Image (cartoon, rainbow, N blue to C red):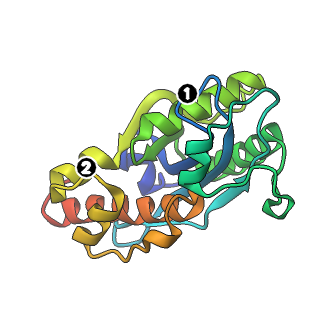
Amino acid sequence: MESKNPLASRFRGFFPVIIDVETGGFDAATDGLLEIAAVPLTMRANGDLAPLPALHAHIEPFEGAILNPAALAFTGIDPFNPLRGAIAEKDALKHMFTELKKQQREAQCNRCILVGHNANFDLQFLKAAVDRHNLKNSNPFHPFSVFDTVSLAGLMFGQTVLAKACYSAGIDFRNEEAHSALYDAEKTAELFCLIANRWRALGGH
């Protein structure tokens, strides 16, 4: 009988995927989703978690999306710059979901769980996009359970801001690259893996 992938036992059958989004505001129902990155995790032979290559897309704002000027100034995103290489929201999500489901099955996990820094923000924008395009049956993520590195970093390092938590963890963080979904997702993945691996080294699961 084929042995179960050890990652499947680490989080009760959940396949952890770090998600970060950049948006046109704070309201998931009305504001545009502009960029999304996903970093799935794997488990090394020694039991440590490690990031896999990221999935990433710049996204065209959906029709009627609100794009708050203050939010765009904060992220530095010009939603209509052709050099972004943005693609339709539905196409971006379908491709990402297909790849994540494939990796989830290979890891013998039951479904994906979103890991994020302020994870419910990312989850709400993801769910709103899923609803817009009727992708519920394609969405691999648990509808409400998340792992949040804000709480974990607050517990481990006394820091809740991503940059400060990374500094405390000894992870290089360049503020000039922050507020890119890809960069923030990759740094959040490093932080989550470091916390989980350190916990395990201290005698945790």
Tell me where residue 204 sits by quadrant: bottom left
Q: Earlier in the sequence, mark 1 or mark 2?
A: 1
- Front residue of this view, candidates 142 and 78: 78
- Front residue of this view, candidates 128 and 105: 128
- Front residue of this view, candidates 186 and 63: 63
Q: Which mark is residue 79?
A: none
Under circle 1, the secondary element is loop
Under circle 2, the secondary element is helix
Identify the residue shown where x is 67% and y is 37%. 67
Q: Is 44 situated left or right of 183 in this image?
A: left
Q: Is 142 situated left or right of 162 in this image?
A: right
Residue 50 picture location, percent across and down = 44, 67
Tally the marks.
2
Residue 47 seen by the camera: yes
Residue 107 seen by the camera: no
Identify the residue shown where x is 41% and y is 30%. 145
Residue type marked 2 = Leu
Residue type marked 1 = Asp
The residue indicated by pointer 1 is 27
Structural distance between the alpha carbons of marks 1 and 2: 25 Å
Residue 170 picture location, percent across and down = 27, 76
Q: Are marks 1 and 2 in contact (CB under 8 Å)?
A: no
Residue 29 picture location, percent across and down = 62, 22
Crowd band around label 1 with a 10 angstrom C-alpha radius: few (<14), some (14–19), many (20+): some
Q: Nearer the viewer, mark 1 or mark 2?
A: 1
Crowd band around label 2 with a 10 angstrom C-alpha radius: few (<14), some (14–19), many (20+): some
Tell me where residue 76 sits by quadrant: bottom right
Identify the residue shown where x is 60% and y is 28%. 127
The residue indicated by pointer 2 is 152
Residue 59 picture location, percent across and down = 75, 47
